[in-house]
Image (tube, rainbow, N blue to C red):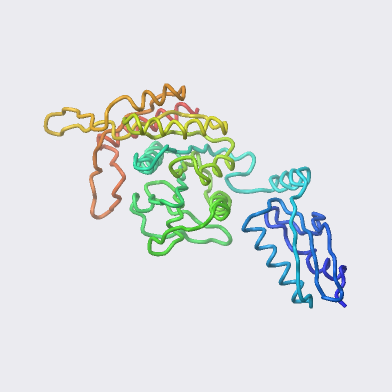
Amino acid sequence: MFTAEQARELINPLKEPFLHISLAELNAIEEIKVKEEKNHVSVKVAIAKTGTAEQLQLQNQIVEALKGAGAETVGIRFSELPEEVLEKYRAEGSEGAKGLLAPGNKTTFIAIASGKGGVGKSTVSVNLAVSLARLGKKVGLVDADIYGFSVPDMMGITERPAVQGEKILPVERFGVKVISMGFFVEDNSPIIWRGPMLGKMLNSFFNEVEWGDLDYLLLDLPPGTGDVALDLHQMLPACKEIIVTTPHPTAAFVAARAGVMALKTEHELLGVIENMSYFESKVTGEKEYVFGQGGGERLAEELKTEVLGQLPLGQPDWDEDDFAPSIYQEDHRIGKIYKEIAEKIVKALR
């Protein structure tokens, strides 16, 4: 005869999927009932967050354990652990935590955001990271644009991260340590994960990558204010932010939403970068304002911050032997503007 005590012994050792502590230690098994005539086991378990992929994973583990011991059918209900329990174990976990999110870590996080796609946010991210490295700073770059990852291609990265023990080693290029979802998919396959899986991947980027000592970690955020951007805002309570826009009034209007989101999540705005500000003729030196004028200034005024720089339209000089299609050389006229922006950022963060 299958008993409630047997069922409890079987599932007590299973780990709560968010806190990674046994159900027994958390006292998370709230109820177990056994209907002898049907050999049916009914279980109620408390976890940190319900309605997630992690809940489904634990559910499968419980069913497998009970049916493997002779239960014919299993019914499971989930509730959420009390807030005081969550606070206790999260605090204990953070004391021994390692990685960039550990208390006391001195890395400055700088998120690069935009209201919409197509404004050159990723181009700004990679060149700003490289410019900070050229100033002698220790720089990491997370390609957090999970659905639209492009950083490896922009920087001409063809290798993949190595694994050392339980840690992933980021790929280093132009003095910048890089991690991207692009390293973990085959043949440029689309990402079709739901929110919880994406959040878990981002958390892995912070805690399971061997970053070493960094002065700055730049994050190329997805455009807009969706789930991934919100997850990052919640993961990084102490984060600086730069908003990228073009001079076009609509682009600046949409970018304001990303800026307001940063302020509402108590991120500090470092400023606005206006990309594609103008086209300058190499022959005459005349400037043409292809996308209009003033968008960056109006956005900075609305968000009560400053314009860090205005970047003209232009293409990097390509080196066929060391191909990196989006990285400007240090002596390129646009490369010099990036260096000036990087110097402003370093000065502001002293």
Q: Is residue 173 left or right of residue 282?
A: right
117, 327: nearer the viewer: 117
Name the image quarter holding the N terminus: bottom right
Q: Position of residue 26 (x, y in %)?
A: 79, 54
Residue 230 higher or lower than 70, as above or below: above
Q: Position of residue 192 (x, y in %)?
A: 48, 58
Q: Residue at x 68, y 57 (%)?
A: 17
82, 201: nearer the viewer: 82
Q: Is residue 210 left or right of residue 55?
A: left
188, 332: nearer the viewer: 188
49, 340: nearer the viewer: 49
Q: Residue at x 79, y 56 (%)?
A: 28
Write down the quadrant of residue 208 in the picture.
bottom right
Q: Position of residue 246 (x, y in %)?
A: 33, 33
Q: Residue at x 55, y 49 (%)?
A: 206
Q: Residue furthest left?
A: 283
Q: Residue at x 47, y 54 (%)?
A: 170
Numbered-mark total: 0
Q: Position of residue 334 (x, y in %)?
A: 28, 35
Residue 204 higher or lower than 231, as above or below: below
Q: Is residue 94 left or right of residue 193?
A: right
Residue 285 higher or lower than 16, as above or below: above
Q: Is residue 146 left or right of residue 174?
A: right
